[in-house]
Image: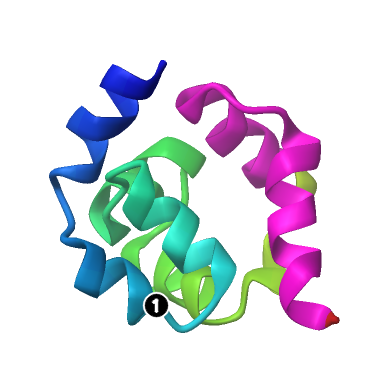
Amino acid sequence: MWKSLEVMTNSYSLIKIRESRNEFEALLRIYGVSNLKLCKIIGVNYATSRKFIENPTQLRFIHAFRLADFIGLTAQDIVDTIVYDLN
């Protein structure tokens, strides 16, 4: 698993990951999911996926489920990442 994580992290430098606006954006960057890739994964347009990145609380459960399925996590992991910023 760690080897695949290293490969995915090469898409973004650690500096870019640290500059993320929220934990959800950092999670996407760690797994190498760009805005364009996110909109294809969850089935929304580019502007909507950008809004989800800026304010992940607007993300619907079905979108979180699709993203989690693509990344290989559980939907609860995605929800926990979003809730972390609310605290």
With 32 as the anchor, is 78 left or right in this view? Answer: right
Q: Is residue 60 visible?
A: no
Q: Quadrant of residue 47?
A: bottom left
Taking 63 as reference, is 46 left or right?
Answer: left
Could you tell me which residue is drawn at 39 percent across and 77 percent down? Answer: 20
Magenta stretch bounds: 62-86
Asked if residue 87 shows in the view, the reply is: yes
Q: Does the magenta stretch include residue 69?
A: yes
Q: Residue 85, relative to residue 75: is it above or below? A: below
Q: Name the residue under label 1.
A: 20
Relative to 8, does residue 28 appear above or below in the rendering?
Answer: below
Q: Residue at x 27, y 45 (%)?
A: 32
At which x and y percent is residue 68?
60, 32
Q: Is mark 1 on a helix, strand or loop?
A: loop
Quadrant placement of the N terminus: top left
Number of dots carrying numbers: 1
Residue pictured at 29% horizontal, 20% vertical: 4
Q: Which amino acid does label 1 sit on?
A: Ser
Predominant secondary structure, magenta span? helix
Q: Residue 33, percent across and down?
A: 32, 47
Image quadrant containing the C terminus: bottom right
Does 17 appear in magenta?
no
Mark 1 crowd level (few <14, some 14–19, many ≥20, 10 Å Cα): some
Q: In this view, does 76 lie above or below 44?
A: above
Nearest the viewer among 85 and 42 is 85
Name the colour scheme.
rainbow
| Residue at the image point whose x is 54% and y is 21% from the top | 72
Q: In this view, does 63 lie above or below 52?
A: above
